[in-house]
Image (cartoon, grey):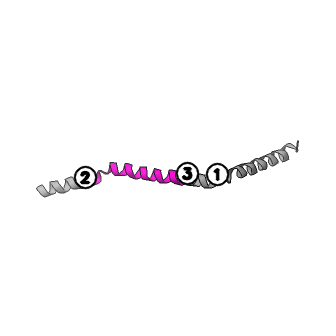
Amino acid sequence: MNMIVKARARLAALRDKKGQNTVEYLLMLTVVVGVVLIAGAALKKFMPGLFAQIQGMISGAANTMGGGN
């Protein structure tokens, strides 16, 4: 009978993983932030040209729709 109580206590301890879940979420958040920072640094030199290209497309479409004024 005493062994059953000990086994149940061990099983209950294994099920209680709140601290482990918190650490796992923090590690995932750290990885996501790292990927975003690396991607941002890699794309930093391409962004001004990309925004200028998008602005030109929008202006061209607006001029076409507005009669070219």
Name the side, left or right, on which 11 lies relative to 68.
left
Where's residue 55, x and y in %?
Answer: 75, 47
Asked whether the residues under the numbered discs 1 and 2 touch, taking CB atoms below 8 Å apart as contact, a structural biologist would say no
Q: How crowded is mark 3: few (under 14 residues within 10 Å), some or many (20 or more)?
A: few
The amino acid type, in three-letter code, at marker 2 is Ala
Residue highlighted by disc 3: 37
Q: Residue 22 carries which label?
A: none
Q: How crowded is mark 1: few (under 14 residues within 10 Å), some or many (20 or more)?
A: few
The amino acid type, in three-letter code, at marker 1 is Lys
* Mark sitting earlier along the chain (3/2): 2
Q: Nearer the viewer, mark 1 or mark 2?
A: 1
Q: Based on the picture, tell me whether residue 59 belongs to the magenta stretch.
A: no
Name the side, left or right, on which 4 lies relative to 67.
left
Q: Which residue is drawn at 29% across and 50% down?
A: 16
Residue highlighted by disc 2: 13
Q: Which residue is drawn at 84% across and 45% down?
A: 63
Quadrant holding the N terminus: bottom left
Q: Disc 3 versus disc 2: distance between alpha carbons?
A: 38 Å
Q: Which residue is drawn at 59% across and 52% down?
A: 40
Asked whether the residues under the numbered discs 3 and 2 touch, taking CB atoms below 8 Å apart as contact, a structural biologist would say no
Q: Nearer the viewer, residue 65 or 46?
A: 46
Q: Residues within 10 Å of mark 2 (few under 14, many from 20)?
A: few
Q: Residue at x 51, y 53 (%)?
A: 34
Q: Residue 44 carries which label?
A: 1
Q: Is mark 1 on a helix, strand or loop?
A: loop
Q: Which of 51 and 1 is in front in this view?
A: 51
**Which range is magenta?**
13-36
* Mark sitting earlier along the chain (1/3): 3
Image quarter of residue 38: bottom right
Quadrant holding the C terminus: top right
Q: Is mark 2 on a helix, strand or loop?
A: helix
